[in-house]
Structures are given as structure tokens and as C-alpha cells.
Amino acid sequence: MLGVLASMLDGVLVGAVYGLGAIGLTLIWGVMDVINLTHGALIAMGMFGVYLLFSGLGLNPYLALVPVAAAGFLIGLAIYWSAVHRVIGRPPLMSLLSTFAVNMVLIGLGTSGFSTSPYNVDISLPGISLGAYTFTGNHLVAALAAVAIAGGLSLFLQRTRLGKAIRAVSSNRKAAELMGIPAARVLAQAFGIGIAIATAAGGLIATLFPFTVLSGGGYELKSFVVTVLGGLGNPAGALAGGILLGLIEGGVTPFIQVSWIPVIEFALFVGILLAFPNGLFARRGH
Amino acid sequence: MEMIRQPFFWIMTAVIALFALLPPLTHDVGLRESLFLAAVYIILAGNLNLLIGYTGYVNFGNIVFFGLGGYLGLWLVTVFRLPLVVAALLAGLAVAAMTAALWCRILRLRGAYFALASIGIAEATKAFVSNFEPWGGATGLYLPMGAFKAMGGPREALWTVYFLMVAVMAATLYLSYAVKKSKFGLGLFAIREDEEAAGVLGVRTPYYKTLACTLSGVLPAVAGTLFFFKNGVIQPEQAFDLTLSTEAIVMLMLGGQGTVTGAALGAFLYEQFRGYLLISPTFSSFQLVIAGALLLVTVLFMPGGLMGWVYQRWPRLRRILE
Amino acid sequence: MSEPILTVEGLETGYGEVQVLWGVSLRVPRARVTTIIGANGAGKTTSLYGIMGSVRPWRGRVLFKGEDVTALPAHAKAERGLVLVPEGRQLFNTMTVDENLEMGAFPPRARARLEDNRARVFDLFPRLRERRDQKAGTFSGGEQQMLAVGRGLMAEPELLMIDELSLGLSPLLAQQLFTTLKTLKKQGMTILLVEQNVHLALALSDYAYVLAEGRVHTEGPAREIAAHGDVREAYLGV
Amino acid sequence: DGTITIGFTNSETGALNVDSSSQLNGFKLWADQVNAAGGISVGGKKQRVVFVTYDDQSKADRVQQLYSRLILQDNADFLFSPYSSGLTATAAIISEQYGKVMITTGAAENKTYQQGNKYLFQMYAPATTYLSGALEALKSVNPKAKLAVAYKDDSFSKAVAQAALARARTLGFEVVFNEAYAPTTTDFGPLINKIISAGADALVGGGHYADGATLARQVFDHKVPLTFLSLLVAPDSPQFASLGDSAINVTAPSQWAPQVTFKPDFGPTPAAFDEAYKTAYGKDPGYHAAGGYGAGLVLQHAIEQAGSLDADAVTAKLNSLDATIFFGHVKFAEDPAFHGLQTGHAMVSVQWQKKGAELTKEVVWPKGGATAPLAYPLR
Amino acid sequence: MSALLEVSGLCKHFGGLRAVDSVAFTMAEGEILGLIGPNGAGKSTVFNLINGVIRPSEGRVRFAGTEITGWAPYDVVRLGLARTHQIVRPLGDMTVLENCTVGACFGRESLGLAAARRVADEVLELVGLRDRRDVLASSLTIAGKKRLEVARALSARPRLVLFDEVLAGLNPTEVGRMIAVFRAIRDQGIAILMIEHLMQAVMSLSDRVVVLNFGRKLAEGRPEVVASDPVVVEAYLGDPDIAARLAEE
Ligand SMILES: Nc1ncnc2c1ncn2[C@@H]1O[C@H](COP(=O)(O)OP(=O)(O)OP(=O)(O)O)[C@@H](O)[C@H]1O
Ligand SMILES: Nc1ncnc2c1ncn2[C@@H]1O[C@H](COP(=O)(O)OP(=O)(O)OP(=O)(O)O)[C@@H](O)[C@H]1O
Ligand SMILES: [Mg+2]
Ligand SMILES: [Mg+2]
């Protein structure tokens, strides 16, 4: 019994991080209808960013998140202007393609730089234990950080002008231009924010699990699941979705072979999609 | 059958003939291997085109057809000792049936959500098969050498499989052309442009979508059987490789979605190109980077894919190269 | 008469290879209502988009308040007070009425007077106040038109350009709108109107241009145009 | 011409990168030494060795294309296999039809050798034997241990685990937990919680480097109350030491360890190889490295015996080979049902032990070849 | 002879809003019925309910003797009931001709491609889009697109068409021409149910007029009668000689 509780708690902690990982994707997707296939690569980039700052300069991994996210924002702008801007508003597949191309480049550079062998950020904060079960400090901190970032972002989108402008542009670009909103710049910033959060998420994950250049892919997949649970372009939803996902994983593990978890997870995912075509926590339809 | 009177029909036929004749005439197995993979890619991209290019539904799960087909086929061959061709065809039908049953519900989802669901299906299937003991779970199915013996030894077997694969490719090309020229195709295009409006105009959208999706599954499934039969082993990681799914989409876009020529050309060039980078001593370590960069350039400066560009440059070709 | 707030000189543009405008020249004086009429496909909408820069001008110049703004992007012009209520509404369908209006007031100069303007728009179209939280996309055709005009007014325009003002509006509402424009005009607002309800348009305006096949066919004081023989026959259906 | 071409693909990129590349080092070292000595003598004539290699990206798509190319365009005389069992089976179809000898290093899955191949020879002890040593060692210290088996969900690890389960039962262990985990797993939290719940006090299993290292680390972080931990592949790699405290007293089945004391019939002594490898690459050789070198060595021996490059002549020599080299005893099954399966080679168990500040890898099983007694319990 | 279209007790609620509230009317073969009313009165919603784009909350729709309440749009068309959209929905990346071919292929007679193209051509001729037949639908002007909507609906060879403000955006002269077209359509025996705000057209075309207000039927009858009905004037028509008042300073 205690075991079930423990693994559910574990699930929630990890889930929060899944959620954070997905926010970047869902934001960009919801706002500019771009399925950003560089997401995974950039999560990985965040991981290695933190790794380098930590093992290279001995910077505290959690502090390292700040420069990493900042760099992520700039990289985001760069990717937007170079690869995304020209294909926006074209058939959705175009952006799919261009981001896939950028992804190939990033992965290629990554593999030639770090090969595909695993790395890890070697810190372990004192955890808390529950009977024989232990929750590492890293998990606790990561979960808190995730919640904080997600909360901040959704406030930003609902309240601030830029936030609303982002939604306006996503809803009707031409009209936005006519109303004096510099659409392109707004989109670029939105993209930058999305990437910044993706890299930050990567950085947090790096403090939990070892990673390779390719690790991002797995989290990208989970991000898709979370996106659906949470609804497109809805950060708070994404966080909730992530936690739910973690909870489900944690909840079922004690009762089935762990190798069946993915089956449950994705079957459930498709089921939910059919039941709630706009996502479980969707606020605005699509 | 006024298709026969179209020049494009004969262009396709010529290309298929080249595929079928070049390797045996030159006795060049290297060429055969490369064309074999090209054929596989053309089959994947070409059938995907029915759903993405014609109907406007982005299916990331297209690899499931290929993988399931492979598993069903090898299972039938190894366990029931069925001859390859029979197994392949049965696999095709079985996959079609499953698709019709399952996907018609998925197809109720629109745009991005459909894309997501298709990813979900791909992953679920993969995870399921890696746990499914009758199919060897993670170990997969190994093909006993005997299976080749039945076809006169490996050497002959591989040639036979190659010709079969070319046949499936031919079927793919003719099918996509026939569909494009048909009333059915017109309905699909209408759905792609605006599903609501199409419905109001009388297009039975649910049936048409399901039919398109089902059609797009049959030939990849057959190809799957052939491909993994040739490999002699099938394992989940290889059978349901999401990257290949995405690459198929890439090929389609590269060539120009919605056009038969585009799908085929995109697939062919992509295969050749990746293959070349992989073996070229200078590039091999940077092959991904280069492939990516070139792809990006094409996307940005040839939005309509290769065919889009060709049509713009020589509008008259629009009539000839479908 | 004071120098015009907007001057268009020999504007030429089109879509892709197709040229649509073949040298359109307009002068829009301050505090007046100017109308463009013309058959379908004459190039009215294209002219307005050309002025805004949504369709890039190929040749010719656009001067706003004396400044050459030909090359500026649309949003820069909106910030200077040159505002277009586009044909076919172009609302932010996924956002509420309120948010739509708020976005209308995006330029800094408009931000300041957001609340007063919102109040004014709501008085103009009470329906919008009743439905301030409804998503614009689910509005009826006419309601969308109200919102489009309202959003335009939110932007504190110095020159308000409206494409197909009365399109889809009930006669009553159309009349109300025209009366509103008249009051706005009295308050000193400058308006450039594209309108198919030629009778009302000419009645309201001071000066009118007749566009045909991408060229200015005739121009003159509204009354003369209204009386002009072949104009009556071609556009007034009499 | 005067050279012997050996072709193979290796996984420069993709999941199998680490294990595959250390093997490559082994191949290279062998080739360099041979060429330094002028080459392999074929019928008295010295012929130099050249490698042709491509990246198979750890994927099956192009394996056959690449092996065809190796054979037909690059005129490879002999082949080494790709790293994993699946890819090897796929490549074997090509190598067999062109009658090319292919020495497999890595592909430990027994199924690979049950497809009726004639020219395929396995360097490593097959998957089925991997964990028996570890279990015997455990039996010697705690016959009553409650055993947990957790393994990577791929063909190799699964084969190993299943063999281990059978062995465990015959040794009379109670198996309280037995599950596979997805190959991409990085978060072992759920698994570990279950192992704790099951009340296991010994854990055997694992898979390859990435997952194995992670599992070891998280077992440590979660303070799992285990007395014995033995994992496949990962702990054998020198890199494993970087785990620090998490690595202490972890044992692993190993195809080979530098300290072994075999008396080679030909080729270098274990110590000599160890030395050469250190000087060449500046790090300790893992068993993949040794296996790679061994593969070359065995091939060289067969060629020299046959006195020709003819595949069938060489095959005959390999079939009849029954010798000991630095890598251990080598003998291939001749029974057509599983021709080429490695039957001679026996594995050892190694353990990371803390000597002062140093972490060193000691051979702890079989007792005969042991360099240190098994450290028990784990913590 | 029984009615061609029979709508009874039709209701549609959106959340709290009663967009359509127990509306009932009938139409005879070949009749032209005008549906007018203030913006947001529920006219387009009535169309959506009739051809099945949305399901009614209550009420029934009978067409040509068949109960079609809750049918899918594509089945309704096959029965011979076509419509246009107020907010145009062209199949943008297809040519004008292809747009109409779709209409003909999947319309009442569900023709083969060749036959469908012929029908499409005739129709385009009729609405005066013949010369644009090979341009992409997306490149038409709003008014052009509205004409396309008309053409597409007619290609289905319907017995009844629903026109939703297809004259909006035309100048009076062009309206005059379209009115002629409508007469031609009617002479082919096709009944027309049209939403219009252009009184000029409504008056001269309609046999009868139904007036909606806040989702309810406000009035019904012959055009000139309805037009002079003070309630209608007050709610919808407003001041006839507004133009004069605008002009005076
Ligand atoms: N997006 C477009 N692509 C290509 N051609 C276009 C596009 N929009 C308009 N056109 C063409 O430009 C010409 C002028 O169009 P425009 O919309 O300016 O006419 P208009 O005077 O506004 O007509 P209406 O009264 O119907 O609005 C027309 O021939 C139209 O077909
Ligand atoms: N999906 C929806 N959700 C909420 N309200 C809706 C929806 N669709 C329509 N409405 C409301 O129902 C009412 C009737 O809409 P409808 O489009 O039928 O009006 P209409 O009579 O066509 O007006 P117009 O002449 O302006 O086109 C409007 O107030 C509109 O806002
Ligand atoms: Mg216009
Ligand atoms: Mg309406």
C-alpha cells in the first residue's frame, strides 16, 4: 500500500517536469500552429547547456538554468527568423518540415560533438524518505521549479498585452497587422519564449536523469501526450496534463509489468483524444 | 479506361520498367539494394500522399501499417509456413481491416489533434508489440533460412523479393494516379480544402476519409512483409520507427504533396541523398547536418516542393506530370 | 481647403504576376468623407490594402500627413493613425468581443483612451455590450460587421478607412451606421469609404472616386457624381 | 592484390554507440599490430589488413545495402558483424549468400545462430551463460537470497535474463520480482519502488551501458536495501568508475578481464594485450575491446592455417579450431542446428571494489581465477 | 400538392441564448421565399438547421415529403436541397470550375466527372463566372466568391436552394443583373429561400416574405404587405428616405 502511495508521489514529481517539458511545444503549436519538431533537440540542448556550465564552470545547476533559458530564447529567435518565419501561414506541413530540418542539423551537430553516449549532472540533494522509499531532493526541487515557471507563463499570456497580442496574431495575423500589432516580431518572441522554456525544462531533467543527445526525443513524445491532455496553447493545462500523466504512470506501475506502461499510456492518450477532442483541460477550442 | 491515353500513365510505366529491368540487366546488386530501399520509400510516401496530399490529414502513424504488415507477414510465414506472396497479401488485407475499424474513429479528429492521435497509435502499437509474446516480444521474429530455401536459396529469394517490391511500387503509383483522376479523388480534395463545405456540397466525408486512410494502409503493409522478410528478422524498434514515419512525410513534402510525381521523386531523391552521405567518407560524420541544411533550403525556397517549383517554372507540365 | 491628410500618387500593384491597379491617384482631405465606388473586381479593396501596405505597392507613392509611408509595414501605419476596417471582417475569432476591442486599441496612442472609446463603441452597438464575452467567431454576419467597425474606432484613427461598411447589415443598422459616421465627421474625423450602397455613400460623402479596371474612371464632388449620367447607369442601377 | 580487406558496419550513431565503439578500438589495435609486423602471412606471403567501415546508425534499414556494398563494391575478403543480434541476423543473410566468413562480436542472442548459417562464427560466450557465474557467487555467500530480476526489454538482455531465471531456480533461489523495462528508460524510480515492495535483497539483470549505469546510480540514490547487485555489460566498462560511490561492490558478468591468467596457444598474453591497449588508448580495455581484438586474432589464425583467403578453407579451420587465447578458450559449435555458436568460452564475474580512495575492478568468480574475494554485502 | 419544405416548431439554443425560437413556415415547389430580419435574428441559423449543419434543439424539418431532421448535410444535398454560406467558404486551392464540379458530382444526380464538368460549365455561364473558370477560387473577390457559392449550389441540380446574402457587396446595377439570374433559376422550377438585406431585391423577387426577430417569427406575407407593416419598419426597415437626411447639412 505504502508502495503505491510512494510511486504515485514519485509520479506527480516527475509529471510536473513532463508538464514543463511540454509547455514549449504546446505554446508554439497553439499560438502559431507550428508543430515544432526541434523541441526534443532543444530540450537536449538545455540538458547539455546545464551539464557544461556545471561540470565546466562548476556553476550550480539550478542557477545555470537562467543563462540556459536566456540562450534558449535567443536560439529560439534565431530559429524563428531563419527557419519558421517564411513558412508561417503556409500549409501546416511546411513548418513541420522546416523544423524537422533544423532538428536534423541540431542532432547532427550534437552527435558529432558528444556522440550518443550518456552524460549526467552529478549532484544529489538530500531527499526525504517514507518508510523504505526515498524521494530525492532533485525531484522535489525540479517539481517546484516546474510549477513556478508554468504559473508565471500562463499569467503572462492571460494578463499582459504581449500575451494577448500573441493570441491575437495567432488568431488572425492579417488583422493583427492592420490593428498595429507587429505580427512577425510578436511571433518571434512567442517562439523564443517557447524554446526558452523547453531548454529550461531540459536543464531540470538533466538534474534527475542521465541523458544523451537523443534523449530529447523521448520527452518530445511525452510532450505530445501532455499537450493533448492539457489542450493546445494552454500552459497551465500542460502542467496539469503532465502531472496527470505522471500520476497515471505512478498509479499503475505497482499493478502491471513496467514494460506495459507505455501501452497503457498511449492507449489512454488516444482514448482521451477521442473522448475530449479539445483536450482535457482545454479552455479555448481549436 | 481513359487513363491509358494519358501521357503520364506511360511515363509512370517507363519508370517502373527501369526499376524492374536495370538491376538484372546490369547484374548490379549494389544498384538493386539502393533501388530496393528507394522503392520502399516511394511506397511509403506514395500511399501517405493519399491521406496527407489528397485529404489533408497528417498521419504520423503511417509506419504502423508498414510495421504491422511486416509482423503479420513474417508471423504467417514462420508459424503457418505460408508462401511469401500469400502472407504478404493477407497481411495487407488484415491491416486494411484493422485500419477501417480503428481509424474511422480517429479520423473524427481534426488537424493537429489527428496528427497527435496518429503518433499515439504508433507508440501504443510499438509498445504493445514489444510485450506481445506470440510475436517474440522485444526479441521479435527470426526467419529460418529454410524460408529462403523454398524460394531457391537466398540469392534468388532476394531477387524475387526485389521484383515483388517493384510490383508493389507500381501498384502504389497507379493507385495514386487513378484516385487522383477519379470522382473519389475530387471528393478527397474537397475535404482537404474545407471539410465542412465539402459536406454541405454532398461529399460523404466520414466514409471518404476512412476509405482514403484504409487504402493508404494496404500497400505499405504488403511492402512491410516483403521488407522484413528480406531482412530475415523483425523487431519492434525497427518495425515501428517513428523517425521513418516523419521521414516519409518529409519526402512527400520535398517532392510536393498532392502530386503523384512529387511523392515518388521526393522519396527517390531523399533515399539516394541520405545513402550517398552515409557512405561518402568526407560527409559521413556530418551527414545529418548536411542533409538537414539542404532540406531546410529546399523547404524555404521551394515551398510547393519540387513539383510546385516545376509547375511554376513550366506551367504546361502541370497537365503532363500529375 | 487644407492640404490632404492622405495622398496616393500613381499606385500600381497586384497579386503574384497579375497586376490589378494601374496607377490610382487619390487625395483625401481632412475632416471630410471621401468615397470610392466601382464594380466588383475594380480594385477598391486592393487600393485600400495597397495604401496600408498589406499588399506591397509596385510603383507609386503613399503620403500620410505629409510623410512618405509607402514602404512602411501595415502596423507602423496603424500606429500613425491610418486605420483600415477590412473587407470580410477579419476578426480575432478565437477571442472574446472585449479582447477584440482591446486589441483594436493596441497602438500606444490609442491605449490611453481605451476605456472612453470602449464606452463609445458600446453605445454605438449595444449588442456588443450584451455579448462582450462571446467569442467573435460565433457571431452572426452583421454582428461581426459591428465588431469590426467598433474595433476600428478603438484605434483612435486620424483617417478611418472602411471597406464595405454596410455589407450584411440590416437596412436599419446600415442607416444607424451612416448616421454615426455623419456625427463622427461632424466631430472632425476623416473617413475614406468603400461602399456598394452607392446611394447612401454618395449622400454622406463630400467627394467621390469611381474606380474601373484598376484606374480612376471619374472623380468629383459627390453630388456631381451622383448626378453623372453613365455613373448612374453603371452603378446606381437606374 | 597484397591486402586483406575486412568490412563491417558499426554504430557510430544511435543507441548502441558506446559498446560498439569500444569494440572498434579492439579491431584497430589488432590490425595495427598485424600491419606493424608486415601483415598476415598467407601461404608464406605477408598481406596487410585494411578495414572498410560504415555507420549503420544502429538501424536495420541500410544494413543489407551496406554489407552488399562491402562485399561487392569494396571487395571485402572477410566480415565482422554489426553490434546487435538483430542487425547481425539481417547482415548474415547477405554474408551467407556470398559465402563470406563473418565473425560476430556482440550479437550474443542464440537465435542468431539457429538460422542455419554456415559462415557465421560467434566470438563471445552466448547470452545464456552470462549470469550463471553471478548466481553461483551469490549462492556461495547467501543461498537464501530473495532474488529480483530486472532487465532491458531487448532481445539480448531478455535471453540472458531468461537463462538466469532457469539457473536461479535450479540453484534454489526464491525469485520475488521479474520484469523487463523499456530500452529507453531513464527513470527507474517506479521499478525501484516495486523492487523494494517485493522485499528483494539481491538484484541481477540490466542491459547495456546507458541503462545499466543509470539503474546502478538510482539504486544508490534511493537507498535500496540490497545486499547484492549484478548487472550486464555496464559495470564492465571502465567508464563505470565515474559513478563513484554508486559503483562500489557492483558485480558484472564479463567476457574477459585484464587480470585473467589464461595461457594462450597463440597471440599475446592477457597482460601483454592489457599493456598494449593502455598505451594505445590511455584507458583500461573492457571486454568489448578484448573481444574485438580476439575476433581479429582468431580470423588471422584461421587464415594462416588455411594458407589462403578462400572462405571455405578458412571456414574449415574455424570449424575445427579448439584453442586458448588471451581472451580465453575458443570453440565453435559444428552442429548445423546452431552452427557457429561459441561453446568454448567461459565468463568471469568482476566487481568494483574500493581500495583506499581507488575504485578497482577485481575478478571475483570463478574462485579459481579470482584476484580478490567477493565483497559482500553490497553496503 | 404537399409543401416542398415544411419547418415546424424549430428551436436552437446556444447556452442561454435562444437563437431560433419555435419558427415554422412552409414553401411550395418553385416558390421564392424571402427571409429577412435584423442582424442576429437567427436567419443563418435557420439555414444551418434546415440543411443539417447543426442539429435543432427542438422542432422538425420535412423536405419533399421526407423527414430530414438531424440528417447530415451530405445526405440532405442528395435529396435536392443545396445552400450557400453567408461567410463564403470557397475550396481555395481548387479552380472555380473544380469547385462547381464537386457540387455537381456529389449533388442530387451524383453525376460522373465528365457530365459534372458540363453541368458546372452551364452554371458558371449562368452566374457570369465563365471567364474565371480556371482561376483559383481563393483569388476571387468577396462578391466573386459569393457568386461561386451560388454556382456551386446550383451545380447540385437542387429542387430548393438556400441563398444566404448572396447579393451583399454588389452595387445596385450588379444586383439588377443577379435578380435576372434568380428569375432564370426559378424558371427552371427551382425553389429559392433567400436571406437578403437588400430590400430592392427582396421586394421584386419574393412571392412571400418571412420576418424573423430575436429568433421568433415577427411577420409573414406578401412583400408589399410586410414592408408596410409598422412593426417590421420599426424593427428592421427604418427610415425610407434616410439618404435625403444624410445629404442635407
Ligand atoms: N488574393 C488575391 N489573389 C489574386 N487575385 C486577387 C486576390 N484578391 C483580389 N484579386 C483580384 O484583384 C482584382 C481586384 O480585386 P478587389 O478585391 O480589389 O476588387 P473590389 O473592387 O474590392 O471588388 P469587390 O467590390 O467585389 O470587393 C479582382 O480581379 C480579383 O480577382
Ligand atoms: N455557435 C454559436 N454559439 C453561440 N452563439 C451563436 C452561435 N451561432 C450563432 N450564434 C448567435 O445566434 C444569433 C443568430 O445568429 P445568425 O447567424 O442566425 O444571425 P443572422 O440572422 O444570420 O444575422 P445576420 O443577418 O447578421 O447574418 C446571433 O446572435 C449569434 O451571435
Ligand atoms: Mg472589395
Ligand atoms: Mg446570417
Image (tube, grey):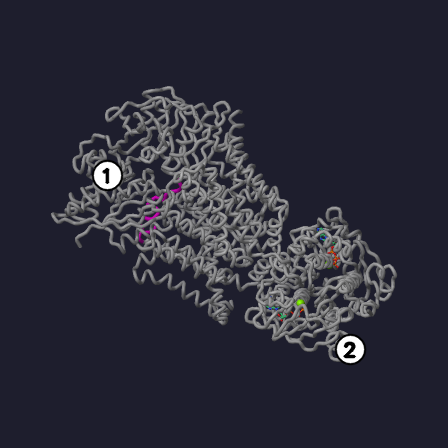
Q: Is residue E33 magenta?
A: no
Q: Where is residue B115 in the image (x, y as percent from the top left)?
A: 54, 50
Q: Nearer the viewer, residue B86 or D184?
A: D184
Q: Which of C163 and A284 is in front in this view?
A: C163
Q: Which chain carries label 1?
A: D
In the picture as drawn, the residue positioned furthest to the left comes out as D44
- Does residue D231 appear in the picture of this structure? yes
Question: How many marks on residues?
Answer: 2
Which secondary structure, mark 1? Answer: helix
- Does residue E193 appear in the picture of this structure? no
Residue type (three-letter) at the residue carrying disc 2: Ala
User: Could you tell me how far apart the alpha carbons at marks 1 and 2 are, in whole angstroms?
Assistant: 103 Å
**Horizontal arrangement in the rendering, residue A158 relative to residue A91 (left or right):** right
**Magenta highlight range:** B139-155
- Please determine whether, in this image, residue D169 is positioned above or below residue C74: above
Q: Name the residue under label 2.
A: C227
- Please determine whether, in this image, residue E134 is positioned above or below residue A5: below
Q: Nearer the viewer, mark 1 or mark 2?
A: 2
Mark 2 crowd level (few <14, some 14–19, many ≥20, 10 Å Cα):
few
Q: Position of residue A57 (x, y in %)?
A: 40, 40
Which secondary structure, mark 2? Answer: helix
Q: Mark 1 points at which residue?
A: D277
Q: Which chain carries label 2?
A: C
